[in-house]
Amino acid sequence: MIREHIAEIREQLPSEVKLVAVSKFHPAEAIREAYAAGQRRFGENRPQEFAAKVEELKDLDLEWHFIGHLQTNKLKLVLPYADLVQSVDSQHLLDAIQDWGKANDKVIRVLLELHIGAEETKSGFKEEEVLDILFRADKYKNISFCGLMGMASHTDNEDDIRADFARIADFKAYLDDLFPELADFKELSIGMSGDWKLALDYGATIVRIGTAIFGERQY
Ligand SMILES: *Cc1c(COP(=O)(O)O)cnc(C)c1O
């Protein structure tokens, strides 16, 4: 089924949009199955599970994205292996990543997570916090700011989801105008299993799809 799901999504996904297969809570075998179907880019949201899968699957040529909450005491589980940390959601985390990058002589590629959904608890920066960071972007020598990530409200109401995506897309366009010197600031990571087709209307460059590829997660 994984093969069919990937083929189905690929058929509808413009070729320039990157598909991150979100494999959290699914075994390494499921990733191997997706790999056999041509999928190379995977996303995980828990540092321990991320590191374990990187190790277990190191015989494959994979691109790993980290998409979950990252505590600063877990950086070493993630930063050596992540091609992109999509979920930077606090100033404290950003500073810690900068320090780690400097100490390890590495430039870490990140997305800033923008809070767009309705849920009060959902993590992410406010617009003004993102602005504040990007005005100081040149201070972060070991961080490459690659764009924005966002999660739409958890709802079946298409208008609400579209409003969330419109907000982040407009803000991304505003930032592109304001910071033309940020050459890597290209990605807009929006869209999950339930809403990725809508996200394409708002300029998604990355979609993060779990359930629609691997099935329901067993928590
Ligand atoms: C789990 C997760 C996804 C994938 O969700 P699905 O609904 O299973 O596609 C996408 N993005 C983030 C940040 C996630 O935590």
Image: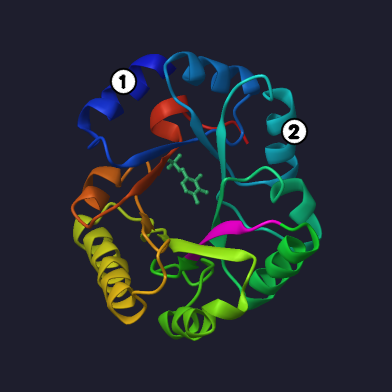
The CB of the residue at mark 2 lies under 8 Å from ligand 1 = no
Q: Does residue 33 lie above or below 102 as drawn?
A: above
Task: Please rate how many residues cluster around mark 1, counting C-alpha atoms within 10 Å: few if below 14, some from 14 to 19, many from 20.
Answer: some
Look at mark 1 in the image and give the residue it sits on. 7
Query: x and y percent of residue 184 in the render?
Result: 43, 61
Q: Which part of the image, by quadrant, shows the N terminus?
A: top left
Q: Residue at x 48, y 79 (%)?
A: 134
Query: x and y percent of residue 94 in the render?
Result: 64, 70
Three-letter code, disc 1: Ala
Mark 1 and mark 2: Cα distance apart in space: 27 Å
Give the secondary structure at mark 2: helix
157, 92: nearer the viewer: 92
Query: x and y percent of residue 89 in the render?
Result: 57, 68
Q: Does residue 15 lie above or below 174 as drawn?
A: above
Using residue 114 as the reference point, say whether residue 84 is left or right of it: right
Q: Which part of the image, by quadrant, shows the C terminus?
A: top right
Task: Check if residue 146 falls in the magenta segment.
Answer: no
Look at mark 2 in the image and give the residue it sits on. 52
Task: Please rate how many residues cluster around mark 2, counting C-alpha atoms within 10 Å: few if below 14, some from 14 to 19, many from 20.
Answer: few
Query: x and y percent of residue 209 in the render?
Result: 41, 38
Q: Residue at x 61, y 33 (%)?
A: 25
Q: Residue at x 69, y 56 (%)?
A: 106
Specify start and end residues of the magenta stretch as a single range: 106-112
173, 137: nearer the viewer: 137
Q: Residue at x 61, y 80 (%)?
A: 139
The answer to whether residue 1 shows anywhere in this view is no
Q: Does residue 101 lie above or below 49 as drawn?
A: below
